[in-house]
Amino acid sequence: AVSGIPGEMHSFYFGSTGGGVWKSDDAGESWRNITDGQFEVGGVGAISVAPSDPNVVYVGTGSVDIRGNISPGIGMYRSTDAGKTWKHTGLRNAGQIGRIQVHPTDPDRLFVAALGNPFGNNEERGVFRSTDGGDSWEKVFFLNDSTGVVDVAMDPGNSRILYAAAWRAKRTPWTMISGGPEGGVYKSTDGGDTWNKLSGGLPQGIVGKVGVVVSPANPERVWAIVEAENDQSGLYRSDNAGLRWRRVSAERGLYSRPWYYMHVFADPQDENTVWVTNVLLYKSVDGGSNFTIVPTPHPDTHDLWFNPEHPEIMAVGDDGGAAVSLNG
């Protein structure tokens, strides 16, 4: 997982699958570990800096890209001093945490996408909401004890509007179970109190892993990268806030090994620019119709972060660690 600090253009965080959280203040030239001795576990799935207060940093443990040798998470951590000290803040049985969305003006209000236990059924999965910085949690979206949420996106212009990506996933010693009839994209328009499953062109039937994101440049535009049966997999786009969808790309490289990838990211300022992380890093500047490969120092890309004011400043998290670009 990667994140940055918008007002400090050379400051970045990355979380690894087994080594905790690291921080750089020189655009990735050097990194220092900031969680050794404070975290009970090394696996990190998500990092988010509060937009209204860069001192507040949230970390969700346990990666949702569940290999057979995955390290289970133990919930959430919070720092209120930009990563110097950390406090465990609950969701200990949430398994793997895929995304954290913090309210744009309230650093204590956040939503967490929890996949749950990757090896068995459990109740602590879905979307969780906190209004007190993680001191307490409310489970606001839950389907069943085998289907969790792998991603959650917030409309940048209206924090009441949320999208959640539901995924039934289970690892056993002999196979990977990915997908179920409940899988897909769900939407809330009341801050997470109620949710409805979206259709209108999205794949039906057995749906596997899904990534979802809202374009900050045009909140009516929503992207979903979807694993589905019957040759329905690919990148889908909605131009009316999820009411109707169409598949804009079925390029195989965008969704290879779905259980390990399936994440999509929108450019903060250009509604037609969208990125997909997979074995390689893919970029489209024409609304998702055509993609080019952006070379990275290491393949197997999993996370992206853009500086919202200067999107050419960005970080990628991959199987080689974290890399920073200052020129897009």
Image (cartoon, rainbow, N blue to C red):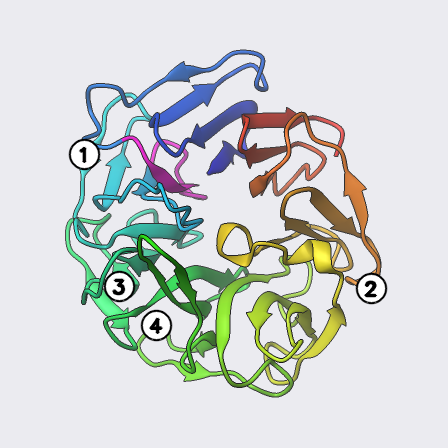
Disc 4 designates what residue? Answer: 192
Which residue does the numbered mark 3 point to in the structure image? 125
Q: Earlier in the sequence, mark 1 or mark 3?
A: 1
Sequence-first tag of 4 and 2: 4
Residue 286 horizontal side relative to residue 327, left or right: right
Q: Is residue 88 above or below residue 235?
A: above
Q: CA distance from mark 3 to mark 2?
A: 34 Å
Q: Crowding at label 4, few (<14), some or many (≥20) Cα neighbours within 10 Å?
A: many
In the image, what residue occupies the spot 50% across and 50% down?
Answer: 260
In the image, what residue occupies the spot 33% across and 28% down?
A: 20
Verify whether residue 47 appears in magenta: yes
Pointer 1 residue: 87
Dot 1 or dot 4, earlier in sequence? 1
Q: Position of residue 232 (x, y in %)?
A: 65, 76
For residue 115, say whether it is visible: yes
Distance in Å between CA atoms under marks 4 and 3? 15 Å
